[in-house]
Image: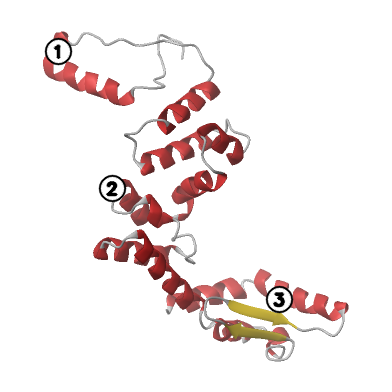
Amino acid sequence: MGGGKYELVDGERRFRAYRMLFDKEGQKWIGIPAIVEEMSPREAVRRQVAINENRQDLTPFEKAKGYKHAWDTGYFKSIRELSLMVGKSHTVVVRSINIFKRFPKEVIDAFESGELKAAHLKYFYRLPNQKAMIKLCRKIIRENLKSTDARELANRMDEEWLSGDRELLLQIVEKDPGIKDLLGKEIRIADLVNKSKLTLEYSKLARLKELILLMNALVKSGVFATTLTEYHDQQ
C-alpha cells in the first residue's frame, strides 16, 4: 500500500489468531510466515472473492457479504461478470447482494446468526414490504420451520396481501373521479386463487391509450402509493 503498509488479501483469521497469541504469550510469537505479492486493488478484490468462494468454513452469510463487498468496490462492470468469476449463477449473486439492500436488519441479523437458513431467504422476495418480511422471519424462528414449511407460509402471506385487490383499487379511484366510473365497464379486477387479474376492454386502439394514460396518471399522482401503504398497514 506504500509507506511500509500492506493490505491483507487472505488469512484474516490466522492473523487475528496470531495477534491474540502475541498479546497472551508475548515474544514467543515474534512472527508468522507471509507471502507478499504486488497486485492492483481490483486484482486484490478478485483474489479475495475467489478464495472465499472455495473455502468450506465460511457461512452463507459471510459469502453473501463477500459478494456485496466485491460489488461495492466498483471493480466489476456487471453482476454477471462477478457471478462468472465466483462460479455462481447470476440469480444467486443478485439475491445475495439484495439481502443487504431490501431486507430489514432483523432478517439480516437472523441470517448472520444462522437462525435463518439460505434456503429460507428466497421466499422473502415475494413479500410486499419489510413489515411482512419481519413477520415471516419471526414465525420461521419461533416455530423452527423447515424450508418447505416456510414456502407454504410465504405463499399464504402472499395471497393475503393480494386478496382484495378490487377493494383496494376502489379505495384508490375514490380519490380520482376520472377513473372511478370505468370499474366494472372497461376496467375489471378479478380475485383469483393465487393472483389477481386486471382486464382492460377497449373499442379501439385510441381508447386503450386513453385508459392506459388514465392509470399512468393515477400512479404518478402519488394517490396509488399512498392508498396502497394505508391499505396494507391495516392488514
- Disc 3 target residue: 215
Q: Residue at x 37, y 43 (%)?
A: 61
Q: Quadrant of residue 18?
A: top left
Q: Nearer the viewer, mark 2 or mark 1?
A: 2
Q: Could you say whether the residue bearing mark 1 is in a helix, strand or loop?
A: helix
Image location (x, y in percent) of residue 207? 84, 81
**Residue drawn at (57%, 30%) of the image:** 75
Q: Horizontal placement of 27 versus 70: left or right?
A: left
The numbered mark at residue 60 is none
Give the camera-side residue of 216 and 150.
Answer: 150
| Label 2, residues with CA under 10 Å away: few <14, some 14-19, many ≥20 | few
Of discs 2 and 3, which sits in the foreground? Answer: 2
Residue 225, relative to residue 15: is it above or below? below
One can see residue 12 in this view = yes
Numbered disc 2: secondary structure? helix
Rounded to the nearest whole Å, what is the CA distance between mark 2 and mark 1? Answer: 33 Å
User: What amino acid is at disc 1?
Assistant: Gly
Instruction: Kindly identify which residue carries mark 2.
Output: 113
Helix, strand or loop at disc 3?
helix
Is 185 situated above or below 15? below
Q: Position of residue 125 (x, y in %)?
A: 48, 60
Please determine whether, in this image, residue 105 is positioned above or below residue 148: above
User: Disc 1 or 3, which lies upstream in sequence?
Assistant: 1
Q: Is residue 93 left or right of residue 35?
A: right
Q: Quadrant of residue 20?
A: top left
What's under tag 3, amino acid-wise? Met
**Kind of residue indicated by mark 2:** Ser
Q: Quadrant of residue 169?
A: bottom right
Distance from Cα at disc 2 to Cα at disc 3: 44 Å
Q: Earlier in the sequence, mark 2 or mark 3?
A: 2
Q: Which residue is mark 1?
A: 26
Q: Who comes first in sequence, dot 2 or dot 1?
A: 1
